[in-house]
Amino acid sequence: MSESIGEQLRKARQARGWSLEQVAHATCIRPDKLTALEEDDYSSFPSPAYSRGFLTMYGKYVGVDVSAEARTMEGHSALHIKDYQYLKNVPVRQLPEDSVAPRERTPSVVPLLVFGGILILAVAIIWLLMTVRRLGLA
């Protein structure tokens, strides 16, 4: 009987003398996800796209061809919003019925006034310098 992809990954990692933590650091894949890949357990991943991507990265890193296994995962990518793991535990915030919608903010004119003041001041200084130069007072 041939070895599973997970067994091949584990044996390739161990043959190189790498720990799960070393591979996790190098590939940026959490050690628990690497363990799941080595055990051929893809249920801990939020979607087949994640498991396929992590499997491909891990396989490239340890030098195991996982393309056949990754291709078998391609047909399982039809997910619904209820299948996304990170959305399952998010509490839905209910607004009280008597709450008021947030007020729309109107743009402030303060930055425009500050810019205008700086511009007028700059023009006045330039005019003053030109007048002093023209009168020969400088």
Image (spheres, rainbow, N blue to C red):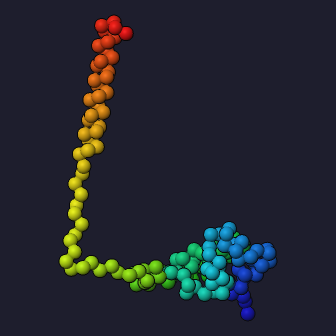
The one nearer the camera, 83 or 131, is 131
Classify residue 100 by image quadrant: bottom left
Residue 120 lies, with reference to residue 42, above or below; the image says: above
Of residue 53 and residue 127, the one placed in the foreground of this image is 127
Which image quadrant is residue 44 in? bottom right
Identity of the residue drawn at 72% across and 71% down: 22
In front of the other: 74 or 94 = 94
Q: Position of residue 28 (x, y in %)?
A: 62, 69
Residue extending farthest to the bottom is 1
Tally the marks.
Answer: 0
* Residue that appears at 68% across and 87% down: 4
Q: Is residue 127 left or right of residue 85?
A: left
Provide residue 84's location: percent of width, then percent of height: 45, 81
- Asked if residue 9 lies left or right of residue 134, the reply is right
Q: Position of residue 104 (x, y in %)?
A: 22, 61
Q: Residue at x 29, y 28 (%)?
A: 121
Q: Residue at x 43, y 84 (%)?
A: 88
Q: Is residue 90 visible to us here?
A: yes
Q: Quadrant of residue 90?
A: bottom left
Q: Classify the position of the N terminus by image quarter.
A: bottom right
Q: Position of residue 25 (x, y in %)?
A: 67, 69
Which quarter of the rendered picture does the C terminus lie within?
top left
Q: Residue furthest top?
A: 136
Residue 67 showing in the rendered view? no
